[in-house]
Structures are given as structure tokens and as C-alpha cells.
Image (tube, helix red, strand yellow):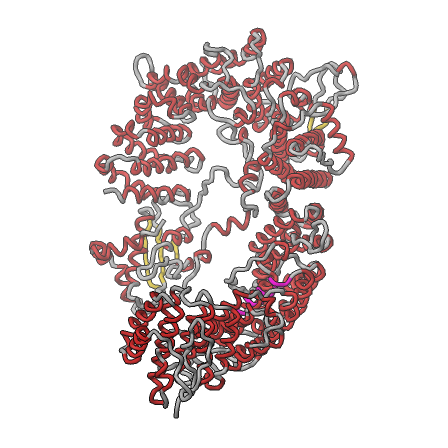
């Protein structure tokens, strides 16, 4: 058999026409005359054919070099091509190898040449290409590999014409059925050739070029390669298919053919093979997947194909996951979703939902959810809505069915998206089928997540939540329901806040009536049940289980800001429940009212409300509290109920003040404005908000409270002396509600009055000085907002005393106002007479009032003695100092008289009043650098009194004790160095008189020490640090002389303070200290008054002291000698009758045990 | 480890004193509490040392926070339930080795505390398994803890609860034997184990 194949294009002569290679027999090729060169290429070719594998490269390099270097390249190339002629002419299968090798000689030379890609001219390239193409037709045995290799080199050459590409493809296709007989390696070479050509074609022509030109080579090529099985080859073939779709714009028919070709491989897997391969199944899957997702016009085939595969029952997990991932890739990649995805959305949903609903394998479920997520992301506008509608229709029943709730929830979350997760999450958790957080990330653009009104709005509530709630919250429901109900409540809270998907202004998803129903449901456990003491669940011990209550509160706190009008409903319900509860059962009702009021406060002040809404609700809240108060008054309720409301108002107010950083912006309030507000309150249920002045709202809110307080003051008091001479200022008494006619209630009534006074202070101290003056508050402090009788002569009448009616029980109301006033807002014409009157009352014996009223008056005398705006007017100062004359003479009365045991209490009371008076004065010494004479008398003489000097001394601390009425918030007059000055003048001179001798008897020495420690415990260490050593010495001595109680309490407090601040001061006294402490503790515990406050405090201090000793950086060797002495008493202290002391004792005991 | 998988109670399930009190009076609003208290407490001028009048409001606690109460079973429980188990990283309370109903105080703690009255505390422990070899060590730990924490007039007895240990007689005998207890505490290794157990006590 002879070879009849093509001949090399030896006639590449510039002038020679291309002569088609002829069969061997016919002729030799027309050779060029340059024999030397000819022989050189012949030689090289021969060498190449015979050479070992490792020399081949070198030979082809030489051939290429010879071509490069030649001057006449056309001739040289001709010779080079002709050099293999002898093998082409050879015959028989025996020469196959040589022929292949010879052809390879050309191919590998081309390979070298292609690196410098301009050596061959375009006609030479074309001739060579044609030659090698023809081999595919003729020489299926030896020529294919070399030809493919050579063509690959040719197509990348610079002068390769893209038009030739298509021809080559068609030429290669002539292999026909022999293609699959080629070795895989050869086929791979051909695939690479295809890939290169396709790349060139795609680059050379745009997709438009292929518009009606695609039927050409693609079907043939598909036909040629359709049976490919080799994995490595597939890794090239799939991208080629992908390139067909992506780059060549195939017609529908061709695309469908292409789809048929690659879909035949799906699902792809890899059989184990003896031939090692670097390709993995995953590589193949990915390559194949990219074919599926390459072109949206195959969607019509691909999606149904995949869904169909998915629905087949016998698929393995890996296959299903592959299908789903492929589907996901398609959904993510396809362009023009309206044409490619939308038509299949419902089909996909109806198939995919079952994978989740009935699925058991997590991988499949996760992949399915991912697909759904991708799907819903690609839908928009009405398509999205109709899809969502379809989904919801399917899922609604599932959500209600406990078997499928979790699955339905996951589906919903996947479809609806991340932003709605809280709502949907709660929906899902409804039955506590908790879904572990889905672990793929979804991010949906904000504008896509709006829920469909008709599906998720009222319908969601009515179809889902309401029936669920009714089922589960029945009072007979089991306790386990608490968990679900808790979730449901949070979901309900979230539902209120959802925004509608409709165009136009933003509005809520649910209608107002639904929102109100929701708030109503939430109100039941939070407001109604606690107040009415009706059990939410019969099975629970508590009225409302704690978790439920907390969730309810949280839900309301979330929901009310989202739907502010609902707060009014809550308030109405609150009042209604209080009314109901009061009629049936009042036990502990006041506590419940207090708790619920706190919740309402928390809702208003959750920080989630807009400032304006917050203020509106705040006013409404206070208004409701007032209504509650008035209703209780009408019912003549126990004062304890009234107190709750007063307190609630106070809390709301304080919280508002915390929020209001905009204080100074408040408009000045004048008498007229005040009256205006008052009328407003009288006329309307709640004042209107003046929204033209934003930023002043908080200020207004508070200031508008003033009329309320004013009303309350008026409500609780009456004008008592209508019949008295007109020259006198009208005296005021308590109204009939509080007049003390029921002696059991007096103390509770007093609480009410005091709390009301405190509320007034909080309101009044907010006003500026001018406002306070404008409102005449110094006058009202005693007129208590009652209009004076109509006698015009009285208009100029100013109050001169505190009302003595009801045994001075109105005093807390007056104090409430006075305490909050600026000094300059109290006129001297009122101040001085009232102060005089107060002093007279306080030094009157027997005492004309109760202890409680006296305490109030003491506080008032302190405030008044402090807040005197003397304006540097010496005559005023003189008048003011004159007011203390009665006190000085009283002081003389108190000391140095014969002992009369019956009046000790009364004397002490008077003395304490004097101290209160001085406390106000000390903070702002009116006398300048001179010592106030009264103060000298008190400090110097009182402790040395033989009879009750000790009692006096015990009380001296009142002089410097920090007190609320003198704290900055209440505008006192304070000198910064006041305490230091006081210490210097009134403590240091007496330190030396704490020891016996030098005319000082033991009695006086002890009394002085008692007085000094009583004072020192209220001073800061910095003030007395320079005398610390002396003070410690006095202290150590006093350990054995002080009485257990107030005295030891002060002493230990001071010593503890010194130990904390400067432990070195005590270092030399440890033995005495330990001994003294032990004896004090033992006495304190065994004393008859072991249960009294000071005794307990003494024990506590002692144990804290012991514990602190071990922590105070003393070296162990200083402490260890005392351990034995301490351990036993500490062990005994572990049996103290007070639990907190036992705890401290245990700590101290362990600390000492652990020493060393 | 002999008993690798004991039943564990969560800390919130253990008996505490707080629950009773909270349920009765604490208002539910968490951060509101402090604010409400500010208002509800009596005005300063009516409190000690300014004034000693009783404040009749029935919804405020005593203002100094001291409670006069004798040592009761709950307090004993609090002392020992936090001891760590020598085997597990859990407390004896969590493992239900000590249980509130198994603590007995005689005379009953309702009587006013007198430092000279001899009081007996009996704690019965429930080993997690019937052949627990560490029951003695646990008993010893409880004994040491109570002796270190109770006043001198208290006598402590620790026993194995009836029927919860296969050799309860022997263990009880060891725990009741003062000599052996003293000797055990001399043993450095054992002392180390006990210290480790008591480390978590507060």
C-alpha cells in the first residue's frame, strides 16, 4: 500500500503557484535549485526522524534558525517543507512512525518559529495551514497529532487570517468518525486547537457577526466531539462549549444543540481509572456548571432540565447538591432575568419547597435555601410580589402546623430576606422549633424587602398571630407555653413597626386597628393582669410569669414608639384596670400600681421615641397619673395609693429632667404665662404641644408640671381661718382628706404630704431666679397657692409665719417650695419674720407639733438660715443676726442648770434645732471672719455641760453633716472653704482638751472627744490630715471610754477612714487598736441595744476594720502577733445575729486565717 | 474518673434566698428601680440621724440594709454549695451532692441567736454514684468549710445520706472520727485537694 496523502507545500516559491500535493507516484515535488540548503534541511529532517527524544528540540531549533537566517525566506521555507518529502512518499504502515516524526519536524520547527511570530508571511501561513488541514482528511494515522500541533502554532502567528480559522475547523472535522479513534492526547491537541481558533474568532468578530452564520461549523464540531469521555479533554471541551454560547451568539436551534451536548454529561462523575489524572470530579462539575450558567437563552432548557433531574426520586445527596448548585449558578449568572428566570420562578418554587419542607439532609436543605435566596434576589417589581404571594400562600398553613413551622420559617427567611429576619424569626420560633441561624449570608437591597400589604399586613396578624395567640394564651394553657408566648409577643411588637410596600408616603404595614389590637394583647400581661391580680395562666404560681412580663414590657417598649398613639390606649387601660382592681381587691394594689407605673415610665423613656412624641406621651402619662390620683381622692382611698401616684409623677419628672439637656433654651415663665398654662390645664385634658418651639419641649414639659403641683397643693389644703381678723395673713389647713381625723392614717398622710413637698421641690428648683420671683413663690410657700380672701386690703399682706393649723402638718408643703428657691427669690420681708416665727416655735416647750413636723421645721430653719440674700446690706445682716438672739438665750438656758431628768428630751430637741440652724449658717458664714457667737457657745460650752453635755456632744456632727437641702441642686449659698474653716475654728482648739489634766476633768475630756469624732466623721481626710496623729491618739484612748452606739460608730468610721487614707498613722497603735476593737465588738454584741442601728453599725465597722487591716500593706510580722487575739472573736462574730455582719466576719476571719 | 456523666443542675435552679424576696417586692422595671427608689425613700430630713420617726410606708425596706436573722439552713447551704467537686469542674450544689432539705440545724434556727447555746448542724450528702471513692474527701471538705465559717458554738456533723452509698457506714465512721479527721488534715496531699475544693467558696 502506498501513501496517497498530501505532499508538503514545497512549492512555496515566490513565483510558483501552489501545486496541490500529489500522490506519491505521480511525481516528486518541484524542488528549489539551492541544493546546499536543501541538503541541510533534508539532513535535519532525517536527523529528526532518527533522533532520540531529547535531541528533537535542538534539531527543530536549528531548522528554525536556518529559516530565520536565510536571506530569501520564501525559498528557504520551501526547502524546509520539501525536506520531509521522502517520508510522505513512503508507503505502508511501517513508515507510519517515521512519517509522523517527519511531520512533527515541521510542527516543532513551527513551534520555534511561532515565538517570533512574523517570520512567515500570510500566504505561507495559509499554504501551510491548508496542507496540514488536508492531512486530517487523508492521513488519519500519522498526521493528526503533528498537524494539530502545527496548526496551533500557525493560528497564533501574526499573519494568520481569522477567516482561515473557520476553514481549519471544517478541515479538522473531516476526521469524522476517526476522531474518537485518536489517542486522547491527540484529541486534547485538537481541542486546544479549537480553543485557540475560537479565541481568535471571538476576538476578530463581534457577536453580531455570528447572527446568521452559526450553523456552519458548530453542529459539525458537536457531532465530532459528542462522545468525548476523557476527563482532561472534557476540561477543555466544556469551556469550548461555553465559548460557543457566550461568544458566538448561536441561534436558538444551535444553542439547543449545544445544550443537548453538555447536558448529556449531567450529572457528571469520575470513574476511578488506572491512568493518573489531575482532574477531579469537582473540576468537572464546575466546568460543566459554567456551561449551564453561560447563556441565558438556554434557560428555557436548562432550568426545566435541572428541576426535572431534581425531582427524580433516586438521586444521591451529592447529585442533588450538584443540581442545586448548578441551578443556583444559573440563577445568579443569567442575564435578562425577565426572560430567563421569571417564567420558571413558580415552577422552581413548587419543586424546591419540598426539598426543605420534607427534607432531612442539611446539605440539600442549605443548598435549596441558597437557590431560593438567589431566586428571590433576581426578581423585582410585580414579579417579586407575585412570587412572594405565591410563597406565602403555600407557607401559611405550614407555619401554623407545628410539624412544618421550622421548615416554613427557613423558607420564608430565605425568600423574604435578611432585613425582615426579626419578624420572621419570631414567626418561626412561635412553636419553639428554633431554627439554627441560617449560615449563608443574604443581603437584600433595602428597597426590595417591603412586605406585601395584602399578605403580610393585617392578614398576617389575623391569620397567624391572632389564632395562635388565642390558642396558647388561654388561661388554662400549660406553663410550657410561656416560652412560645414570649416569642410571639416579641414578634407582635415587631409587626407593629413594619413598613408598608405601597408607593407613596411611608406608612405602617398594619392598619391602626390591628396595631391597637396588638397593643391590647400585649397590655394584658403587662398592665391588666398585674393590676387586677388575675392570673395570666392558671398553671403558674405568679400572676404573670416573669419571663412573660419582661417580654411584654420589651415588646411594648418597642411597639409604642413605632405607633405612638397606642400609648393613649395603654393609659386608658391602666386607669380602667386600677378602677376595677380597687373595687375588688386592694391588697398590695399600691405596689402593683407602682410596678405598672414604672413600666409605663420605662416605655416613654426608652430612648426610642422621637423627642416630640416623647413629650406628648410624657404629658399624657403625667396626666393619667393625675387622673388616677384624683380618682383615688374621690374614692377617699388610703393615702398609700395617693403616694404611689405622686411618686410616679415625680419619677417621670426626674427622668424627663435627665433627658433635657436644653434647659437654658426654655422660655422665661411669667406670672401671666403661668396662669395661661393653668387655664389650659383646666380647659383641656392635656395641654397642646407647641411644636413651633422645638428644643424647648423638655423645659416646657417640666414647667407645665407646676400648675399640677399647684393644683395638688390647693387640693390638699383649705383656708382655715376665714373668720379671723382681716389684718392677718390667711392661715391654711389640710383639707378634709388629710386632716388626721382618722388617727390610723396620720402617718401615711404625712408620707403623702412629704412626698408631695419633695415633688414640688423638684419642679420649683428648675425655675430661674426671675421665674421664681415672677411666680411669687416665696409668698406661695406659705400661701400654698390659695387666693387670699377678696378683701383688697390683704393683697399687700405678706406671710410672716408657717401655718400652725393641724399641728403644723402643712410644713412639708412649705418646705417643698422653700427648699427649691434661689436665695434671691425669697424676699427679706418674708424671710425674716418667718425665720423668727420658726425659731420661736422650735424653742417652745412643750413642743406644739409631732416629731415628724418638727423634723420638717428643723430642715426649714436650716434652709432659711442659709438662703438669706443679704446683698451686702449691713442692716439686713444685722436684722438677720438678731433672729438668733432667742437661740443664744435659749442656749444659756440649756446649759449650766440643775439637772431635771424630765426635760432632757426636750432640751436635746431644742439643742438639735439650734444645730440645724447653725448648719445652714456654717455653709455661708454671715459673720465673715468672726466666729458666730452662737456657734462658739454651742461648740465650747455644750460638751462641758455636766448633765447632758455628752448627749449634746454626740449631736455636734449635725453641724457639718452633708444634707440634701444644702446640696448644690437646691441653690444654697455655700463657701467653698467652709468645712476647712469650721474645722480650724471649732475642732483644732479642742483637740488638746480631749485629755484629762490641766484643768480638764475626765468627764469633759471624753465629751470633747465624742463631739470631735461626731464632727470628724463628716469631714474629708484632707481637712484633718495634719492632725491625724493626735486624732489617732485620742481615738485609741476613746476606744475604752466611748459608749457603744453612736459614739463608737463615729469613732470607728473615722479610724477606718484614716486606715484607708494613711495606714502609717495607725502603725504604732496596732496592739491597742486590736484590743480596743475586740472589746467594743463584744460589748456591742452583748449590749441590750444590740439590735439598734448604731450598735449594728459599730460591729460592722469593727469587722471591716479587721479585714482592712490585712489589706492595708502592713507587713505580716506587724499583724501576726495579734492574730491569736483576733481569731476567736472573729469566729464568734460569724454567729452574729445580723446576716450581713456574719458575711463580713467570715471575710475578715478568712483574711486573718490566711495571713502568713 | 468514676462517674463521667453526672446529672447537673444549672446555677439558676439552685435554691437561693433572693428569689423569695424579689418576687414579693421588686418592681419589674430594671433600671427604673434605682430612680423609683430615690423618690420612694423617705426624705432625708425624716431619716436618721436627723429624725427618728417611724416611716409607715409599707413598701420600703429597712433603709440600712441590715437583716436580723439567725443562721438558717439556706445560709449553711450557701456556705457549702459553692465547694468544687474534686472530680468535676462543678460545684457540690450543681451536682446535687448537697441539698437544702438535707441540712438540719438543732435547735431550730428560729430561736434568737445566743452565742453560748450549743447548736448542731447536720449535713447529709448524696454522692453522685453509690461507690464514689471520693465521698470521704467531699465530706471532709464540707466539714472543714463549715468549721472555718461557723462560730465556735456550732458542732458540725457530716454524714452520707442513707442508701446513697454502698459503704456509708464506713464513710460515716471516718467522717465522725475526730482523730482521723485531724490526721487527714495533716496530710499535705489531702490538704492540697481540700484547698483546691474550697477555692471557689465565696
| In this rendering, position of residue A116 left or right of residue A705 | left
Find residue A782 and report its horizontal and vertical position in percent.
66, 22
Depth check: give the residue in front, B91 or A71: A71
Residue at the spot 36% in from the left edge and 45% down from the top edge:
A1135
Quadrant for the N terminus of chain A, please.
bottom left
Q: How many labels does the image show?
A: 0
Residue at the spot 63% in from the left edge and 64% down from the top edge:
A336
Q: Does the magenta stretch include residue A1053?
A: no
| Residue farthest to the bottom, as pictured | A1
Depth check: give the residue in front, A665 or A615: A665
Report the magenta stretch's main SS.
Answer: helix
| In this rendering, position of residue A720 left or right of residue B10 | right
Find residue A180 and report its horizontal and vertical position in percent.
45, 84
Q: In this view, does A602 lie above or below B137?
A: above
| In this rendering, position of residue A359 left or right of residue A193 | right
Q: Is residue A796 above or below residue A1132?
A: above
Q: Is residue A426 above or below residue A302?
A: above
| In this rendering, position of residue A529 left or right of residue B159 | right
Q: Can residue A400 be seen in this view?
A: no
Find residue A392 and report its horizontal and vertical position in percent.
66, 66
Q: Does the magenta stretch include residue A377?
A: yes
Rendering quarter of residue A998:
top left
Depth check: give the residue in front, A969 or A720: A969
| Residue farthest to the front, as pictured | A33
Quadrant for the C terminus of chain A, please.
top left
Extent of the magenta region: A366-379
Find residue A643 and report its horizontal and vertical position in percent.
63, 38
Q: Is residue A945 visible?
A: yes
Rendering quarter of residue A1130:
top left
| Residue farthest to the top, as pictured | A875
Amino acid at each position: 500500500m502506498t501513501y496517497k496523502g498530501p505532499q508538503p507545500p514545497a512549492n512555496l516559491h515566490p513565483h510558483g503557484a501552489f501545486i496541490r500535493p500529489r500522490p506519491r507516484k505521480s511525481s516528486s515535488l518541484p524542488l528549489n535549485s539551492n541544493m546546499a540548503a536543501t541538503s541541510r534541511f533534508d539532513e535535519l529532517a532525517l536527523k529528526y526522524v532518527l533522533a532520540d527524544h531529547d535531541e528533537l528540540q535542538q534539531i527543530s531549533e536549528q531548522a528554525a534558525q536556518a529559516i530565520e537566517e536565510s536571506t530569501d525566506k520564501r525559498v528557504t521555507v520551501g526547502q524546509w517543507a520539501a525536506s520531509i518529502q521522502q517520508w510522505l512518499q513512503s508507503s505502508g504502515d511501517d513508515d507510519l512512525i517515521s512519517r509522523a516524526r517527519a511531520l512533527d519536524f515541521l510542527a516543532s520547527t513551527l513551534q520555534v518559529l511561532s515565538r517570533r511570530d512574523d517570520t512567515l508571511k500570510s500566504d505561507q501561513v495559509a499554504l501551510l495551514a491548508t496542507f496540514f488541514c488536508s492531512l486530517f482528511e487523508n492521513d488519519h494515522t500519522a498526521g493528526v497529532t503533528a498537524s494539530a500541533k502545527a496548526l496551533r502554532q500557525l493560528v497564533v502567528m501574526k499573519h494568520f487570517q481569522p477567516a482561515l480559522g473557520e476553514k481549519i475547523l471544517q478541515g479538522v472535522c473531516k476526521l469524522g468518525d476517526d476522531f474518537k479513534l485518536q489517542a486522547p492526547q491527540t484529541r486534547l491537541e485538537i481541542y486546544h486547537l479549537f480553543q485557540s481558533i475560537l479565541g481568535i474568532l471571538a476576538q476578530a468578530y463581534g457577536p453580531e457577526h455570528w447572527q446568521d452564520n452559526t450553523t456552519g461549523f458548530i453542529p459539525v464540531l458537536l457531532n465530532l466531539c459528542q462522545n468525548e469521555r476523557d476527563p482532561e479533554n472534557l476540561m477543555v471541551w466544556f469551556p469550548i462549549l461555553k465559548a460557543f454560547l457566550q461568544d458566538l451568539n448561536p441561534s436558538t436551534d444551535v444553542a439547543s444543540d449545544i445544550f443537548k451536548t453538555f447536558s448529556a454529561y449531567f450529572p457528571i462523575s469520575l470513574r476511578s481509572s488506572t491512568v493518573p489524572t489531575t482532574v477531579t470530579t469537582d473540576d468537572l462539575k464546575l466546568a460543566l456548571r459554567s456551561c449551564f450558567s453561560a447563556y441565558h437563552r438556554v434557560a428555557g432548557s436548562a432550568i426545566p432540565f435541572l428541576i426535572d433531574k431534581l425531582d427524580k426520586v433516586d438521586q444521591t445527596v451529592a447529585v442533588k447538591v450538584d443540581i442545586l448548585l448548578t441551578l443556583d449558578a444559573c440563577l445568579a449568572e443569567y442575564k435578562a432575568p425577565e426572560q430567563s428566570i421569571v417564567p420558571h420562578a413558580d415552577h422552581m418554587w413548587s419543586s424546591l419547597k419540598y426539598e426543605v419542607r420534607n427534607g432531612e439532609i442539611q446539605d440539600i436543605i442549605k443548598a435549596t435555601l441558597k437557590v431560593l435566596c438567589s431566586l428571590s434576589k433576581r426578581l423585582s417589581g410585580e414579579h417579586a410580589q407575585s412570587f412572594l404571594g405565591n410563597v406565602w400562600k403555600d407557607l401559611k398553613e405550614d407555619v401554623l402546623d407545628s410539624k412544618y413551622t421550622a421548615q416554613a420559617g427557613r423558607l420564608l427567611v430565605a425568600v423574604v430576606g435578611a432585613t425582615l429576619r426579626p419578624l420572621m424569626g419570631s414567626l418561626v420560633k412561635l412553636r419553639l422549633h428554633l431554627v439554627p441561624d441560617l449560615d449563608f449570608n443574604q443581603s437584600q437591597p433595602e428597597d426590595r424587602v417591603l412586605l406585601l400589604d395584602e399578605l403580610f399586613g393585617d392578614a398576617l396578624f389575623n391569620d397567624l398571630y391572632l389564632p395562635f395567640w388565642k390558642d396558647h394564651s388561654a388561661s388554662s394553657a400549660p406553663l410550657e407555653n410561656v416560652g412560645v408566648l414570649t416569642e410571639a409577643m416579641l414578634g407582635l411588637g415587631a409587626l407593629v413597626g413594619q413598613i408598608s410596600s405601597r408607593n407613596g408616603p411611608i406608612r405602617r404595614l398594619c392598619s391602626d386597628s390591628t396595631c391597637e389590637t396588638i397593643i391590647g394583647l400585649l397590655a394584658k400581661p403587662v398592665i391588666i393582669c398585674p393590676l387586677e391580680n388575675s392570673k395570666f395562666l392558671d398553671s403558674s404560681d405568679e400572676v404573670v410569669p416573669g419571663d412573660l412580663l419582661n417580654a411584654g414590657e420589651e415588646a411594648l417598649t418597642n411597639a409604642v414608639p413605632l405607633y405612638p398613639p397606642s400609648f393613649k390606649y395603654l393609659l386608658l387601660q391602666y386607669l380602667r384596670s386600677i378602677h376595677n382592681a380597687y373595687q375588688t381587691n386592694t391588697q398590695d394594689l399600691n405596689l402593683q400600681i407602682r410596678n405598672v407605673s414604672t413600666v409605663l415610665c420605662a416605655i416613654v423613656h426608652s430612648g426610642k421615641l422621637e423627642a416630640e412624641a416623647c413629650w406628648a406621651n410624657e404629658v399624657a402619662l403625667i396626666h393619667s397619673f393625675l387622673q388616677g390620683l384624683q380618682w383615688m381622692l374621690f374614692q377617699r382611698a388610703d393615702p398609700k395609693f395617693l403616694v404611689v401616684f405622686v411618686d410616679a409623677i415625680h419619677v417621670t419628672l426626674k427622668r424627663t429632667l435627665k433627658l433635657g439637656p436644653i434647659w437654658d433654651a426654655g422660655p422665661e415663665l411669667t406670672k401671666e404665662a403661668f396662669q395661661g398654662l393653668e387655664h389650659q390645664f383646666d380647659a383641656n385634658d392635656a395641654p397642646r404641644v407647641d411644636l413651633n418651639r422645638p428644643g424647648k419641649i423638655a423645659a416646657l414639659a417640666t414647667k407645665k408640671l407646676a400648675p399640677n403641683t399647684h393644683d395638688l397643693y390647693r387640693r390638699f389644703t383649705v383656708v382655715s381661718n376665714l373668720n379671723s381678723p382681716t389684718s392677718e395673713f390667711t392661715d391654711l389647713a389640710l383639707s378634709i382628706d388629710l386632716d388626721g381625723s382618722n388617727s390610723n392614717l396620720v402617718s401615711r398622710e404625712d408620707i403623702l404630704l412629704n412626698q408631695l413637698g419633695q415633688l414640688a421641690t423638684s419642679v420649683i428648683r428648675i425655675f430661674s431666679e426671675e421665674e421664681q420671683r415672677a411666680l411669687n413663690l416665696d409668698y406661695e410657700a406659705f400661701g400654698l397657692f390659695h387666693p387670699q380672701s377678696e378683701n383688697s386690703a390683704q393683697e399687700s399682706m405678706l406671710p410672716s409665719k408657717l401655718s400652725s393649723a393641724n399641728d403644723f402638718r402643712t410644713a412639708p408643703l412649705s418646705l417643698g417650695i422653700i427648699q427649691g428657691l434661689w436665695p434671691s427669690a425669697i424676699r427679706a420681708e418674708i424671710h425674716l419674720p418667718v425665720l423668727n416665727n420658726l425659731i420661736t416655735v422650735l424653742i417652745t416647750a412643750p413642743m406644739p407639733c409631732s416629731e415628724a413636723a418638727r423634723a420638717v421645721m428643723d430642715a426649714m430653719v436650716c434652709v432659711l438660715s442659709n438662703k438669706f440674700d443679704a446683698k451686702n446690706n449691713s442692716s439686713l445682716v444685722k436684722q438677720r443676726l438678731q433672729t438668733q438672739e432667742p437661740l443664744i438665750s435659749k442656749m444659756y438656758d440649756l446649759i449650766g442648770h440643775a439637772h431635771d431628768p424630765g426635760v432632757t428630751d426636750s432640751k436635746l430637741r431644742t439643742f438639735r434645732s439650734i444645730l440645724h440652724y447653725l448648719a445652714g449658717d456654717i455653709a455661708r458664714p454671715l459673720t465673715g471672719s468672726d466666729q458666730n457667737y452662737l456657734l462658739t457657745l454651742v461648740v465650747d460650752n455644750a460638751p462641758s455641760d455636766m448633765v447632758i453635755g455628752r448627749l449634746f456632744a454626740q449631736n455636734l456632727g449635725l453641724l457639718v453633716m452633708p444634707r440634701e437641702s444644702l446640696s448644690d441642686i437646691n441653690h444654697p449659698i455655700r463657701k467653698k472653704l467652709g468645712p476647712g474653716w469650721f474645722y480650724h475654728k471649732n475642732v483644732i482648739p479642742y483637740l488638746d482638751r480631749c485629755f484629762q489634766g490641766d484643768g480638764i476633768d475626765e468627764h469633759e475630756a471624753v465629751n470633747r472627744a465624742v463631739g470631735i469624732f461626731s464632727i470628724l466623721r463628716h469631714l474629708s481626710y484632707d481637712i484633718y490630715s495634719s492632725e491625724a496623729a493626735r486624732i489617732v491618739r485620742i481615738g485609741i484612748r476613746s476606744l475604752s471610754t466611748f459608749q457603744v452606739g453612736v459614739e463608737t460608730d463615729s469613732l470607728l468610721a473615722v479610724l477606718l477612714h484614716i486606715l484607708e487614707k494613711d495606714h502609717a498613722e495607725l502603725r504604732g497603735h496596732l496592739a491597742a487598736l486590736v484590743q480596743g476593737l475586740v472589746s467594743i465588738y463584744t460589748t456591742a454584741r452583748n449590749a441590750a441595744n444590740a439590735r439598734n442601728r448604731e450598735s449594728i453599725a459599730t460591729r460592722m465597722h469593727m469587722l471591716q476594720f479587721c479585714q482592712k487591716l490585712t489589706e492595708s500593706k502592713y507587713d505580716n510580722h506587724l499583724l501576726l502577733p495579734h492574730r491569736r487575739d483576733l481569731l476567736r472573736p472573729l469566729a464568734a462574730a460569724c454567729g452574729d445575729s445580723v446576716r450581713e455582719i456574719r458575711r463580713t466576719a467570715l471575710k475578715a476571719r478568712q483574711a486573718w486565717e490566711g495571713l502568713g | 474518673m468514676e462517674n463521667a456523666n453526672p446529672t447537673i443542675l444549672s446555677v439558676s435552679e439552685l435554691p437561693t434566698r433572693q428569689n423569695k424576696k424579689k418576687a414579693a417586692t421588686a418592681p419589674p422595671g430594671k433600671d427604673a428601680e434605682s430612680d423609683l427608689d430615690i423618690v420612694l425613700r423617705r426624705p432625708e430630713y425624716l431619716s436618721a440621724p436627723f429624725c427618728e420617726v417611724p416611716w409607715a410606708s409599707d413598701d420600703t425596706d429597712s433603709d440600712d440594709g441590715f437583716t436580723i436573722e439567725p443562721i438558717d439552713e439556706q445560709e449553711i447551704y450557701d456556705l457549702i454549695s459553692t465547694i468544687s467537686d474534686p472530680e468535676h469542674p462543678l460545684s457540690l450544689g450543681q451536682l446535687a451532692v448537697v441539698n437544702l432539705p438535707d441540712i438540719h440545724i438543732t435547735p431550730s434556727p428560729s430561736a434568737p441567736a445566743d452565742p453560748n447555746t450549743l447548736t448542731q448542724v447536720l449535713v447529709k450528702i448524696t454522692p453522685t454514684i453509690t461507690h464514689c471513692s471520693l465521698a470521704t474527701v467531699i465530706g471532709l471538705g464540707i466539714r472543714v468549710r463549715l468549721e472555718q465559717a461557723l462560730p465556735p458554738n456550732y458542732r458540725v456533723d457530716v454524714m452520707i445520706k442513707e442508701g446513697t452509698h454502698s459503704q456509708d457506714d464506713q464513710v460515716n465512721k471516718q467522717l465522725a472520727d475526730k482523730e482521723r479527721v485531724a490526721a487527714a488534715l495533716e496530710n499535705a496531699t489531702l490538704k492540697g485537694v481540700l484547698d483546691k475544693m474550697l477555692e471557689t467558696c465565696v
